[in-house]
C-alpha cells in the first residue's frame, strides 16, 4: 500500500518536472506582423523631442513590466505568464519600426494593446524611437 503510494507520488513528481522542463525550453510563439505594418515608415524623426516624449510614455506605461532599461525586469514582470524578454537582442532591434508600432498598438496576451490608451500614433512612434535606445 505504502510503496504503491510512494511510487505514484514519484511518478507524478517526475511528470511535473518533465513538463516544466519542456515548457521552459519552449521557444516563444512567433508573433506575426502583417506585411503592411512591416514596411510602414516611421513618420517621427528620432530627435531630442521625440525621445523625451518616448521616455516619459515609457516610464508611465511600459516600465512596470519591461523594466527601466527594457530588460524585462519590471516589478510586474514576475506575475506575467509570458516573459517580456529584453529589447537589447537582435531579435527585437532587427524588427522594423512598423513591426514594433504594430505590436505596441495591438498587443497580445500579457502585452496590453495601447491604441486606446495612447491614441496619438505619433506617441507610439516616439516609443519605437525610444526602444531603439534600449539596445544595450
Ligand atoms: C503588463 C505588462 C506589460 C506592459 C505594461 C507592457 N508590455 Fe510590452 N510586452 C509584455 C509581454 C509579456 C511581451 C511579450 C509578448 C509575447 O511575446 O507574447 C511584450 C512584448 C512587447 C513588444 C514585442 C517585443 C518582441 O519581442 O517583438 C514590444 C515592442 C513591447 N512589448 C513594447 C511595449 C511598450 C512600448 C509598452 C508601453 C507603452 C509596453 N510594451 C507595455 C508585457 C507588457
Image: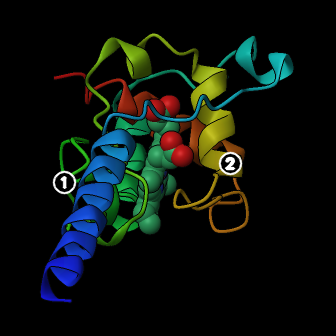
Q: Are marks 1 and 2 in contact (CB under 8 Å)?
A: no
Q: Is residue 106 left or right of residue 65?
A: right
Residue lying farthest to the right in this orientation: 36
Q: In the figure, residue 24 lies in which quadrant?
A: top left
The answer to whether residue 59 is seen in the rendering is no
Point out which mark residue 73 bears: 1
Q: Nearer the viewer, residue 79 or 47?
A: 79
Residue lying farthest to the front in this orientation: 1
The answer to whether residue 22 is seen in the rendering is yes
Point out which mark residue 12 bears: none
Report which residue position mark 2 lands on. Answer: 105
The x, y position of residue 27, in whole percent, is 43, 30
Q: Nearer the viewer, residue 26 or 13?
A: 13
| Location of residue 34 with respect to 71 vertically, above or below | above
The x, y position of residue 130, in whole percent, is 37, 34
- Disc 1 crowd rating (10 Å Cα; few below 14, some 14-19, many 20+) is some
Amino acid at each position: 500500500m505504502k510503496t504503491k503510494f510512494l511510487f505514484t507520488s514519484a511518478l507524478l513528481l517526475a511528470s511535473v518536472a518533465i513538463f516544466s522542463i519542456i515548457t521552459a525550453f519552449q521557444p516563444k510563439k512567433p508573433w506575426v506582423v502583417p506585411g503592411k505594418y512591416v514596411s510602414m515608415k516611421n513618420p517621427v524623426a528620432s530627435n531630442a523631442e521625440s525621445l523625451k516624449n518616448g521616455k516619459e510614455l515609457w516610464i508611465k506605461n511600459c516600465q512596470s513590466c519591461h523594466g527601466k532599461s527594457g530588460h524585462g525586469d519590471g516589478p510586474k514582470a514576475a506575475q506575467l505568464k509570458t516573459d517580456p524578454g529584453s529589447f537589447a537582442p537582435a531579435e527585437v532591434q532587427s524588427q522594423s519600426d512598423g513591426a514594433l508600432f504594430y505590436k505596441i498598438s495591438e498587443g497580445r496576451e500579457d502585452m496590453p494593446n495601447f491604441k486606446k490608451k495612447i491614441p496619438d500614433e505619433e506617441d507610439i512612434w516616439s516609443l519605437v524611437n525610444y526602444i531603439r535606445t534600449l539596445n544595450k
